Image (cartoon, helix red, strand yellow):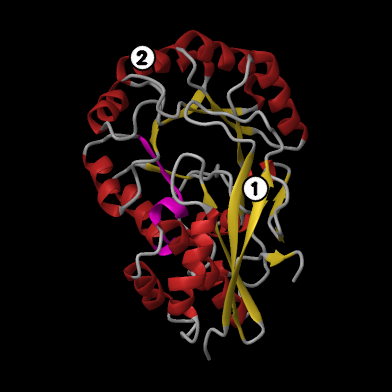
Amino acid sequence: MQIEWIRARQVRMPRTDPAWRTASYAASALDACILEIGCEGKVGIGAATAHPTGGISVDDQLSQINGPVHRCLVHAHPLARTRIIEEVRAAGVHRSLVTAVDLALHDLQGKLADLPCHALWGGAVRSGGAVARFVGIKGPTELVTAVEDLVEQGFTHMKVKLGTGLEEDVERVRVLRSTFGDSIWIGIDGNGAYTTDDAIALTRALEPLDVRLIEQPIDYRDLDGLARLTAESPIPIMADQYVKSLQAALEVCQRRAAHVVSVKIGQAGTIDEARTLAQLCLSFGLRVHIGGGAHPAVVDAAAMQLAATVPGIDDECEVGEFMALTNDPTSGVIIRDGRFDLSPAPGLGITLADA
């Protein structure tokens, strides 16, 4: 048995909200590449995103896939995932493509075994969870309209982007709470827009509004500031961008620089590393939240199966942002009434529309 071929395609995925913005970037569309790995009539699917704030372009991703990734994968045994990932990394491939290869190999292995990935990862400990959807920075009226649309779709968990100033940000949350009452869960993401002192003031102003967590309100590299903020905040503080390795996660845990850690497969590198990172944080008594972003659906499908196989993580997961994009060439993710359900289909449960 050996991998017979790989191929990749570029896909441009316009946002359903062309005015999308956060405190750190704005984007009306997402560029990504879809990776396919073929073996014995089965196709494993992965994806890599070209993020607006950094990384490499899709053209560079495609060049690396057609060069070093192709050399590492074609004729390799499809079950030798650990060795393949080591070789891909040794070839200097960008970390986004390491993740894409890892996803595609997991998907392929599940399809070859005719089992869903969660069955190969030790079995699911839950069948699904609440999907937290993102809302970009907007004025109060537009914000209410955007949340109303998500509520009509069945979602009850909202992560709201903030970062234009204390008074404006508090007013946004106040309007949401007065409009929707306790029918919605509200988390916020400051995308590093605040100083530590202002972030502490923000947490105290938001405390009466039942905000469930605050993600990365200050520069993610400022662990001293995050530790002070965590110690003084009445609302759980969540670390995100800093946590890109086990060493970084260990630093956050040891310094108590967060109450919650956002675990993302793409930031961790591989599914195995994301699982280990989550278990490390849980062992230190920190909460673990499966984070996400705008990606092709295969990334969210993998995050769902990860979330279902790690005991003790938060119920709400950021696995629905593929729904904020159009032109996704894949299908298979199951989201009903604001919750994700595990797919019984083999692998990650994803198929290509033109397969």
Local SS, label 2: helix
Question: For mark 1, does the 10 Å Cα neighbourhood hold few (<14), some (14 to 19), or many (20 or more) residues?
Answer: many
- Disc 1 residue type (three-letter): Phe
Query: In the rendered image, which residue does mark 2 sit on?
Result: 198
Q: Is residue 350 left or right of residue 286?
A: right
Q: Is residue 138 left or right of residue 95?
A: right
Position above or below: 137 against 28? above
Q: Is residue 13 left or right of residue 281?
A: right
**Is residue 65 part of the magenta span, yes or no?**
no
The residue lying toward the viewer, choosing from 93 and 349, is 93
User: Quarter-wise, where is residue 220 in the image?
Assistant: top left
How far apart marks 2 and 1 lie (CA) works out to: 33 Å
User: Quarter-wise, where is residue 155 in the image?
Assistant: top right
The residue lying toward the viewer, choosing from 101 and 319, is 101
Find the magenta span and give its range: 259-272
Residue 217 spot, x, y in % from top left: 40, 26
Local SS, label 1: helix
**Is residue 265 part of the magenta span, yes or no?**
yes
Query: In the rendered image, which residue does mark 1 sit on?
Result: 322
Q: Residue furthest top?
A: 167
Position above or below: 102 against 243? below
User: Mark 2 or mark 1, which has the lower sequence index?
Assistant: 2
* Residue located at (28% from left, 25% from top): 231
Residue 100 spot, x, y in % from top left: 51, 63
